[in-house]
Image: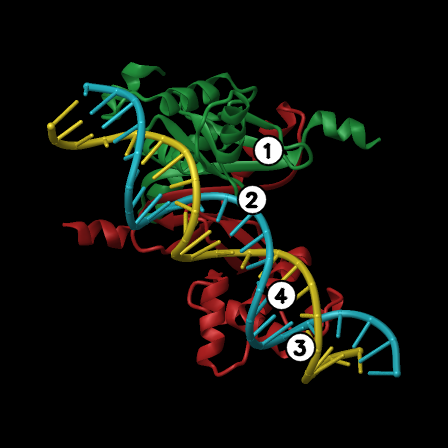
Chain colours: A green, B red, C yellow, D cyan
Amino acid sequence: MDAQDLKSAGLKVTLPRLKILEILETSKNHHMSAENIYRALIMQNEEVGMATIYRVLTQFEESGIVNKLNFDNGQSIFEVSSVEHHDHLVCVKCGKIDEFSDEVIEKHQHNVAKKYGYQLTDHYLYLYGICKLCQEQKA
Amino acid sequence: MDAQDLKSAGLKVTLPRLKILEILETSKNHHMSAENIYRALIMQNEEVGMATIYRVLTQFEESGIVNKLNFDNGQSIFEVSSVEHHDHLVCVKCGKIDEFSDEVIEKHQHNVAKKYGYQLTDHYLYLYGICKLCQEQKA
DNA sequence: GTCCGTGCAAAGGATTTGCATAATC
DNA sequence: GATTATGCAAATCCTTTGCACGGAC
C-alpha cells in the first residue's frame, strides 16, 4: 500500500493518509482502533484530529484498502486488507488478535447462504477465547 | 422463560423484566434492539425508561437469558437464548435476520481454536447478504 | 486556481451512571 | 424493613458533521 494505491482509489495523496496507512502496516498486530491510530500519530508529533482518522478510515474502507471489524466491546478495529480472506480469534483477556482461515468453514458458509436463498455479500466470524499465554498466567 | 427463570438468576421479579422477556419472546423475529423493546413497551402504555431496558438486558445477558449480537451498524440486537447454539444470516437490504446452525462449521471452529491454543469462550458468525425477497425486488 | 482534505469544535446516537423514589421479598 | 429496581436526567463513549483554512493537483 502506497501513494499509488491512494491515487487509484481516487484519493489525493496527503500526509495524514500516508501516515495512517503506514501505521496500520507497521503496527505490531495490524489491528488498530481509530484511537490507537490517533495516539500513534500524536506520539510522532503529527498534528491530526480524530475526525480525520475516522474520515480517512471510512474512505479506506469504501475503497477496500482496509477492513473494519466490529468486536464485542463496541469499538471498531481496522486492518489493512490482505489478498486472502481471513477470520479472527480474539483473546478476551489480553485483547490479542490472531488471524486464521479455514476453507471448510468458508465453503459451508456459502452452502448455508445458498440454502437460505441469500446472495452473500460479506461474512464475519469471530472466535473469542483465552489465548495460551493468558491461560498459563491464570495459574 | 418466566418469573421462575428470573428468580433462579437471582433477579427480582418485576414488571419491566417480565415485560421485556415477553416482548423478546413474542416479537416477530425474536431479534430486538433496546430501542425496539422500548418502543414496544411505550405502545403498551408501560412507563419505562431506556436505562431500565439496558440494565435489564445487561443482567439478562450476564445470566445467560439472552444473547447480545453486535451487527455491522453498531446497534446491539438481543435474542432470547435458545438451547441450541445458532448463528445469523442478516439481509443487508431489509434487515431480516435468519438463524442457522451448521455442525461442520462448529466443529472446525473448535479445531481452529485448539490449533492456536485458545480456550474458546464464545463465537459469533455473521453472514451478510441479500435475501431472496430483496433480490427479486431489485428487478 | 479549483477542488478536495484537514483541524477544530460542536453535534449525534447508543449506552451508562447518579440519585431519589418505589417496588419486591 | 432491607435491599434491589426503577425512572429521570445528566454523563459518557465512540463516531460524525459543519465550517473556515490549507494543501494537492
Eyeballing the image, is B45 above or below B32? below
Eyeballing the image, is A102 above or below A35? above
- Which kind of residue does numbered mark 4 sit on? Val
- The spot of residue B93 in percent (x, y) is 29, 51
- The residue tagged 4 is B56
Between the C-alphas of marks 2 and 4, the distance is: 18 Å
**What is the number of the mark on residue B14?**
3
- The residue tagged 1 is A90
Between the C-alphas of marks 2 and 1, the distance is: 10 Å
Between the C-alphas of marks 4 and 1, the distance is: 27 Å
Label 3 CA crowd tier, 10 Å (few <14, some 14–19, many 20+): few
Please say whether residue A52 is visible from this viewpoint: yes
- Which kind of residue does numbered mark 1 sit on? Val
Q: Earlier in the sequence, mark 3 or mark 4?
A: 3
> Residue A3 lies in what quarter of the image?
top left
- Which kind of residue does numbered mark 2 sit on? Asp
What secondary structure is marked by label 2? loop
Is the C-beta separation of discs 4 and 1 under 8 Å? Answer: no
Kindly identify the residue that appears in the image at 47 percent across and 65 percent down: B35
| Tag 1 subunit | A
Q: Nearer the viewer, residue B124 or A109?
A: B124
Between the C-alphas of marks 3 and 4, the distance is: 10 Å
Report whether C9 appears left or right of A8: right
Is the C-beta separation of discs 2 and 1 under 8 Å? Answer: yes
Label 1 CA crowd tier, 10 Å (few <14, some 14–19, many 20+): many
What secondary structure is marked by label 1? strand
| Tag 3 subunit | B
**What is the number of the mark on residue A72?**
2
- Which kind of residue does numbered mark 3 sit on? Thr
